[in-house]
Image (cartoon, rainbow, N blue to C red):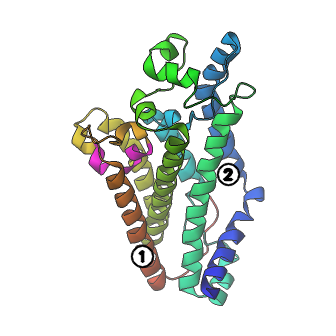
Amino acid sequence: MAELRKAALLAAHNFQKWPVNPRVYVVFLLELAYVHWMVSPVGDFCAQGGYTVGPWVFPFLLAEPYSRLMVMLGLILLLCDAPFIESDHPALLLRSGRRTWTAGQVLYIAGTSAVYFAVVYLLTVLVLLPHVGFEPGWGKVIHTFCQTRMAGQHGIVLLFDHQISNALGPVEANLLELLLCWLLGALLGLVLFVLNLTVNRSAGAICAAALAIFPLFVERAGWWMHYISPVSWASLSVVDLTGTTAFPSLGYALAVLAGGNALLALLAFLAMGRRDIDVLKSV
């Protein structure tokens, strides 16, 4: 328990550097600009018709592969300096030990993924203000967009997939979307950590970016490639929610992401145990 507390304090130490890290502000400003561009037409539609829309747009933001790419690249940029060995870390590592220090970095990656996607979700809500309201189910606007082509007719580029709204309620869909994104974000962060530590500092970024770009090719290939494209699973549109499609099941996606995170975390501990410590300049 004491080791876990030390690891949590090390993760918190990394978060304390955010207010003085310009990259954090750049990432979230870029995501705000992108979310505004994608989601604000829904607010414009509501303003013109006097409608309200529920705070449930997040799953549809990630339904399109280019949106998944833009959102995942933001997280990769946020974590690209893994394994986060800056000038103060050798002393922290000596005091805490390699295993506890590594656990702290793994917790930081998981925490960063959770914070990042929570912020992206909140941005989808903030952009829609003051037209956010609560109605039964998905609400009139989202239900209409999912069941008709009205969204495209009004210049809305979000992909409102009726398979999501038919299979899940709004709260369940958004929670599942956040869970999948959190696991995927942690996976990408651990890829950055392990490859940057064991190969070189650019290897992790290249591999993580390739994983983020891969769904663009999957969309033009056979359905079976969705089974080897974890970033695709950030969209509930390409997860089999009803047992009636050829897409990977929700259980498959969750199991592979959880297993991948566990394996990469183990590799991080093994790599850190054998690695000489070099102070890295922040990206």
Instruction: Say which residue label 1 marks.
Output: 266
Pick whichever, 42 or 52, lies toward us: 52
Q: Residue 203, located in which quarter of the rendered image?
A: bottom left
Residue at the (49%, 41%) spot, across then down: 173
Q: 2 or 100: nearer the eye?
A: 2
For the record, the magenta segment spans 226-234
In the rendered structure, the answer to whether residue 109 lies left or right of residue 27 reads left
- Horizontal and vertical percent for residue 60? 50, 33
Give the spatial CA distance, label 1 vs label 2: 28 Å
In the rendered view, would you say 129 is above or below 149? Answer: below
Residue type, mark 2 in image: Arg
Q: Magenta span has 147? A: no
* Type of secondary structure dominating the magenta stretch: helix
Q: Amino acid at mark 1?
A: Leu
Q: Residue at x 58, y 71 (%)?
A: 105
Foreground of the two, 41 or 134:
134
| Quadrant of the image containing the N terminus | bottom right
| Label tally | 2
**On the image, which quarter does residue 266 sit in?**
bottom left
Residue 78 rendering spot, x and y as whole percentages:
60, 54
Q: Position of residue 273 (x, y in %)?
A: 47, 84
Quadrant including the C terminus: bottom right
Residue ID for mark 2: 23
